[in-house]
Image (cartoon, helix red, strand yellow):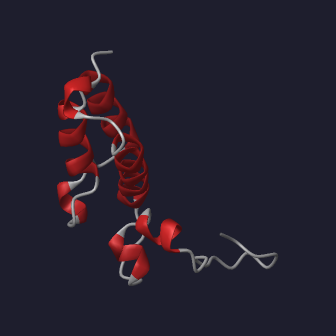
Amino acid sequence: MVDESGNGYLPASGFVLRLVAPELVDGTSMSPTDDVDGLGRLAEELLATLNENSGVGKLRTVIERATAQRETDRFPSMGEFLAAWNEGSGR
């Protein structure tokens, strides 16, 4: 979130912190892979309610890469993440 002065901060919400890349929490980095991680974590939360019989196995693999602990193991861009998501979902 950003305040009126343009200063960025994280709200003290446990749910929001679960959706934030680890390096943003500890302040070590800021890069496009942080956004990939965040969207991957949101997708993970949404897919948590589906069972494996609904065809989400391939998407779980995509999510695992998007939310990898190390930045260098994630998709380097949102475009590559979305391309893998579309392929995994059969689009």
Q: Hey, which quadrant is residue 34 in on the image?
A: bottom left
Say left or right for 81 vs 60: right
**Is residue 42 depicted above or below 60 in this figure?**
below
Q: Quadrant of the C terminus?
A: top left
The answer to whether 51 appears left or right of 61 in the picture is: right
Q: Position of residue 65 (x, y in %)?
A: 21, 49
Figure check: 26 above or below 48:
below
Which image quarter holds the N terminus? bottom right
Residue plotted at (39% across, 44% down): 43
When asked about the image quadrant of residue 37, the answer is bottom left
Front residue (pair 33, 15): 15
Residue depicted at x 18% and y 31%: 58
Estimate the x, y position of residue 10 in percent, counting from the top left: 57, 76
Which of the 4 image quarters holds residue 24?
bottom left
In this view, the residue farthest toward the top is 91
Lateral position of residue 69 relative to residue 23, left or right: left
| Residue 26 sits above or below residue 53 on the image | below
What is the tally of numbered marks visible in this picture? 0
Looking at the image, which residue is at 82% across and 75% down?
4
Q: State the residue in front, 33 or 10.
A: 10
Q: Residue at x 36, y 41 (%)?
A: 49
Question: What residue occupies the far right of the structure in this picture?
Answer: 4
User: Which one is in front, 59 or 37?
Assistant: 59
Vertical arrangement, residue 79 with respect to residue 3, above or below: above
